[in-house]
């Protein structure tokens, strides 16, 4: 699976949690096809106050934010559009 570019086609944010949608060109049944993948990232500051990022690590209060971005990413991949909701900064 190869990525078309180094930028996601769509990014959903909720606080310090971000889900990025990546478009991948693949071959299926001998024909070119598009397949989407999802990466989830959580940003945090370490003890030295430096920004870091983590995958697959979340605290209980991050779960509602993860739910928001996962639902939006799922809707984008499956239905080809975003739900009516947007992030706190008007991002979709």
Image: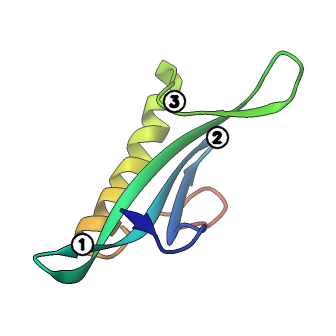
Residue 38 screen position, x and y as percent: 41, 53
Residue 72 screen position, x and y as percent: 38, 58
Q: Residue at x 54, y 62 (%)?
A: 11
CA distance separating discs 3 and 2: 9 Å
Q: Earlier in the sequence, mark 1 or mark 2?
A: 2
Q: Is residue 8 positioned above or below 17 on the image?
A: below
Q: Residue furthest top?
A: 47
Q: Secondary structure at mark 1?
A: helix
Say which mark, if any, is on residue 62: 3
Q: Residue at x 30, y 63 (%)?
A: 75
Nearer-the-camera pick, 24 or 81: 24
The residue singled out by tag 1 in the image is 79
Q: Earlier in the sequence, mark 1 or mark 3?
A: 3
Q: Secondary structure at mark 2?
A: loop
Indicate the quadrant where residue 67 lies.
Answer: top left
The residue singled out by tag 2 in the image is 16
Q: Residues within 10 Å of mark 3 (few under 14, many from 20)?
A: some
Residue 40 screen position, x and y as percent: 49, 44
């Amino acid at each position: 699976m190869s990525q078309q570019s180094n930028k996601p086609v769509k990014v959903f944010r909720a606080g310090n949690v971000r889900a990025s949608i990546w478009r991948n060109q693949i071959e299926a049944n001998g024909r070119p096809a598009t397949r989407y993948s999802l990466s989830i990232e959580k940003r945090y500051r370490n003890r030295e106050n430096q920004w870091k990022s983590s995958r697959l690590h979340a605290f209980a209060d991050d779960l509602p934010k993860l739910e928001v971005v996962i639902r939006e990413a799922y809707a984008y991949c499956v239905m080809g559009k975003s739900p009516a909701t947007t992030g706190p900064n008007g991002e979709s």
